[in-house]
Image (spheres, helix red, strand yellow):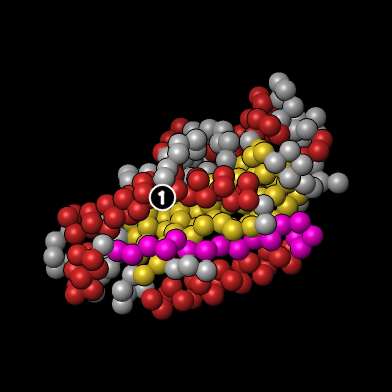
Amino acid sequence: MTHISLGRVGRTRRIGLLASGLLMGAASLSANAGSLISSTEYLDYQLPEKIQMMCTERDNCPEIEIKYLKTNHGWIDKTVNARIDNLVVNSKPTAESAPIKMKSSQEDVTAAINDFATSQFQDMPEEVSWAYSLMVTPDYLGHVNNFELFEINSYVFTGGAHGMPYSEYLTFDLTTKKQITLDDMLIKGKKPRFEALAHEAYKAWVKTVADDVSSYEKSWPFMLSDNVTLTETGINIRYQHYSIGPYAYGMPVLSIPYSQLDKVIKPHFIPK
C-alpha cells in the first residue's frame, strides 16, 4: 500500500489511516467474500520541495490524503478512481462541480495538488498556523442483489469557519459491468412518482429540524437529487451541504422504503 509523505505534520495520523484502510479491506472481504474484495491504497505523492521546507519550518504542512479503490473488479476501480481524480482536480472552489465524465491524467492530479498546497502560502499571512486540507477516499458499502455499492467522501478546507465535505454514491451492476444511475433504476415514466415519494420523505425529514414544513420549504425548497444508493430496506437519497438545508444540518439522507417503490423501480433492484 502506497502512502503520502507530508513531512513531520500528519505522519501519526497517516499511520492510523493506513491501519484503518487495511481494516476496511478485511471488513469488505467478510461482507461479500464470494464476489468482491475491497481495499484502498494511498496516492504516492510528495509535496514540492519548496513547500515541504516552508511548511515544515512553520509546522503547518497541508493535509493531503487521497486514497484509491482497489478491488478484484478492475472495471469498477477504473470508474471510481477516475471520479476521485476528477474530484481532486476540481477541488477548488468546490468538489461538487466536478463533472463525472471529465478525464483527468495523473499529471493533472499532481498539478492540482501542488497548486492546492502552494495556494495555502499565497492566501494566508505568515503568522497563521492552520493548514489547508484535501482528503478524498472511497468506501465500500456492501451489495444488494448483483449490485455493488460504493461511496466517495471528500473534504476540502481552505480557511474560514469550516471545510466543505462532499459525498457521492456509486452503484455497479456485476451482471452488465456498468455503472447504474437513478434513471436506470426507475421504470419508464415513473420519475414523477419517485420525485413525489422523495418530496414526502423530505417533509418527514424537515419535521425533525423545523417546526413548520411550509415555512422551511420557502427558504430551503425541495429538489430531487440523483445521488442515490440501494440499501436492504429501500433507496437512500444523499444531499450535499446547502442543498436542502443550512450547513449545520449536514448532508441529509432521505429514505424511501421498497414497500413504496413497487412498480416505481424495476423489480430486479428490490432485494429478493
Look at 67% across and 57% down and name the residue there: 72
Residue 105 falls in which quadrant of the image? top left
Q: Is residue 113 magenta?
A: no
In the displayed structure, would residue 122 be above or below residue 16?
above
- In magenta, the rendered stretch is 32-47
Q: Is residue 45 left or right of residue 147?
A: left
Report the front residue among 146 and 264: 146
Percent x, y for residue 15? 46, 76
Percent x, y for residue 173? 71, 42
Q: Residue furthest top?
A: 189
- Can the viewer see residue 219 in this picture? yes
Residue type pointed to by label 1: Gln
In the displayed structure, would residue 269 be above or below residue 41?
above
Look at 31% across and 77% down and name the residue there: 8
Look at 61% across and 34% down and name the residue there: 199
Look at 42% across and 74% down and name the residue there: 13
Label 1 residue SS: helix
